[in-house]
Amino acid sequence: MNKIDERETFVKAFDMIDDRFIEEGMEDIERRKSFPVTATVSAFAAAAIIGGAAYTMNQPKSVVDPGAQADKNGYSSDIAQSEDDGNGDADAENKAADHDAIMAYSEIQRAVSAAQGQYPDNYAGMYVDKDTVHLMLTDVSGSEYYLGLAGDYSDRVVIEKADRSYNELAELMNNTITTLGQGVKCEQLFRPEQNTVQINIKNDVRPQEKLSLSYDETLGAFVTNDGVIIYLDTEGDDFDDSVDYDVDMKSDEYYNMSYEERVEAFNIDPERLKNASTDRVLELAVSYPLGVNLMMFDDYEDGLEDMIKRSTVFQELIVRGDMKEAALKRYAGYISEYAPEQQWMQRMILEALIEYKVWDKMTDDEKKYLTEIHDAIGTSEEYKTDLLGVLIIPYRDGVISGRSAEDAARKAVSEKFNGEYGLNISLMDGAVVTYDGSQSAYTVLITGKDAGNTYIAFSVTVDAEEGSVLSAVMG
């Protein structure tokens, strides 16, 4: 079976199990990822497991919606504290407090956003300011419930009284947008610290013609009678974000398409893409219906380059000057906004884009920010993809990369079991690499075949600082 035929088989099989996977839930994840097709998957990037380390996480001030606001909070100045200011013990305590605040935020957010579009009646939002979570409630008598959600991090939570609940603010937002009319293009933000919402209008709409407004010189914005903050941000492009993949993936016509025909069907007119915002182009890229192609190569970078070569969406995205900012904002949303167990392929594509197209363009402050998001995500969910671990672990902890650990492990297995023991082991591509920060070591699991085609597993422990092999066992 050639590469194209193999890919067609995989994609069609993927179509058949997709709906069932969503319905049956988490137990199908591994079955879907290991669907019996002879495609090679680079297992390290998908299975790097982070554990055992005490991570430092400082979130930007006033984090309301990490997905929507990550690029608006001045992370370059607020994220990283100097490591050479002579206050090592104080800095360590501050960073630990900041970490606990993020953990409290994540635990509460995950619980209160479980219902579809509805929050508890007394919940009015929350935000993080350095080492404190400000939790807004319309009825503070119910605060014990939320402190219980924060668990061991409850000492970082401060309860504050608010007049309007989060559900009321959402209704206020919707009503205001409806009043502005269908032609409005805008960004919508919750502002729990002010117990209101904010609308940033992106196109030539005159809100004062439809709403009763006053101008607040301090804010530099209009304010409605209901306290909605409205900014006019019309200097940018007049984006058309209605662009989408206009393909019926449940039709017989689609099912009978060849792989090349599907690629062509999902190619959106480049002129339409040029008129879309970078956020929208990025969303189209991570939602690429043939995104499974990322895993059809020996290396994720090759899979990404193949999609760039074939897809007009990816071709448009990589030339956008603000792709970096859009990707960071989208990735920050995984702290609480998105359901990673249902969107693991989107997550993998986003992480591949960051790893291969964004990381090298990031400043040191931005890398620190990405590291903090990565660590917050890693401690706020049970299931995760982690392509970025291969970059972030060495950057954060000053150790060798997981790929270097895998190379050392492969060399050790070959020398010990093939050379010393005389076995004829053929090692398969891919490995599961686990990093234990408390031991500063990697565990590398590799599978091979002996001369009789019997599968054999090897477990190799590699010193994460020196790169030396500490142990290598078979079975």
Image (cartoon, grey):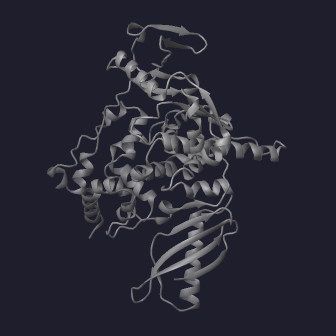
Residue occupying image coordinates x 52% and y 73%: 445
Task: In the rendered view, tell whether residue 241 sits above or below residue 446.
Answer: above
Q: Is residue 362 visible?
A: no
In the displayed structure, does residue 89 sit left or right of residue 200?
Answer: right
Relative to the observer, which residue lies in front, 222 or 452? 222
For the N terminus, the image quarter is bottom left
Q: 449 or 128: which is nearer to us?
A: 128
Q: How many marks?
A: 0
Q: Percent position (x, y) of residue 316?
A: 39, 40
Name the residue furthest bottom.
Answer: 422
Q: Residue at x 55, y 86 (%)?
A: 417
- In the displayed structure, 259 sits above or below 68; it is below
User: Where is residue 368 drawn, in percent x and y?
Assistant: 64, 45
Quarter of the image for residue 72 reads top right
- Image check: 289 left or right of 430? left
Using residue 264 as the reference point, say whether residue 451 is left or right of it: right
Q: Residue at x 33, y 19 (%)?
A: 183
- At 50% from the left and 15% from the top, the residue drawn is 227
Residue 459 vs residue 42, the one in the foreground: 459
Above or below — where is 35 with respect to 130?
A: below
| Figure quadrant of residue 135 | top right
Q: Position of residue 299 (x, y in %)?
A: 45, 62
Measured along the vertical axis of the image, is residue 28 above or below residue 307?
below
| View extreme (left): residue | 252
Pick the front one: 315 or 157: 157
The residue most toward the front is 141
| Residue 354 seen from this side | yes
Displayed quadrant of residue 62: top right
Q: Position of residue 400 (x, y in %)?
A: 64, 63
